[in-house]
Amino acid sequence: MKSKSDFDKFCILVPPDGTFDPFDEEKRKENLEENIEKLKNKIIPDKWEIVYTLSQWACRDEVIKLFGFTLVSYSWITPLSKWIGDRKCLEIMAGHGALSFALKSVNTSIIATDAFDWEGKYNFNSILWTDVEKIDAVSAIQKYGKDVDIIICSWPPYKEDIATKCLLEMRKVNPNCVMLYIGEEDGGCTADDSFFETMDIIKDETFDNCFAGNYTRWRTIHDYPMLIK
């Protein structure tokens, strides 16, 4: 029986250059190995396109171990950084720090933080993409919230109230601050009901345009960036 480390069983992420044949088994294995190696070497793709097989979940698990839950790419990081401009950001629950790493690489001012309560669980890779301060999310907002303009929160834990606590703490510490939330909508597998009941969605066409046609997600996964307060 093959294990999850057998790359040829996985669906794969491919560069959008039109040259890849998903039905070529050898090329499929080679392509996935190359892309996993890129992640190990902290290379953010310009854009990811996904070729699906029945083993999507095995592939997704491998990517999450190195990269986190959000498929970060410069196709949306670059316009997002322009939208952010000279505003300061704080990322809470940053995990491996890939999102903060990508934003830093395009000159966004951002502090990455995480409680690291996932260490030793879920078989996640312990290698960080950038410096990530060990501090829980609410404490991070208490420490840095008054000095930042945007708090980034991606994939908060499912059925837990930490995202709600963070949103309320942000409002308390800095009423002018906004939150960039990346996750599924109400009824999905991120945060809990109270978070969606508490949030106020901010309508911002320029923000929305950063992701339109640029944001990639796994099949049957419905995460998407939202601007809230």
Image (cartoon, grey):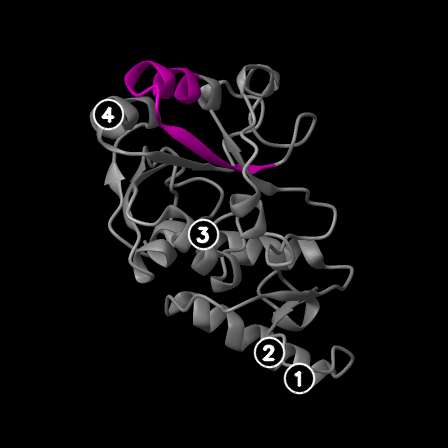
Report the front residue among 215 and 154. 215
Give the crowd class for mark 2: few <14, some 14-19, many >=20 residues within 10 Å: many
Q: What residue is drawn where x is 58% and y is 53%? A: 61
Residue to which mark 1 is pinned:
27
* Labelled pair 2, 3 in contact (Cβ < 8 Å): no
* Labelled pair 2, 1 in contact (Cβ < 8 Å): yes
Where residue 31 is drawn, which disc sits there? 2
Distance between the Cα atoms at labels 1 and 3? 33 Å
Q: Which of marks 4 and 2 is nearer the N terminus?
A: 2
Please tell me whether mark 1 sits on a helix, a strand or a loop.
helix
Q: What residue is drawn where x is 54% and y is 15%? A: 198
Give the crowd class for mark 4: few <14, some 14-19, many >=20 residues within 10 Å: some
Q: Please tell me how many numbered marks the rendered image carries.
A: 4
Where residue 146 is drawn, which disc sits there? 4
Residue to which mark 3 is pinned:
80
Mark 2 or 3: in front is 3
Name the amino acid type tagged 3. Answer: Leu
Distance between the Cα atoms at labels 4 and 3? 22 Å
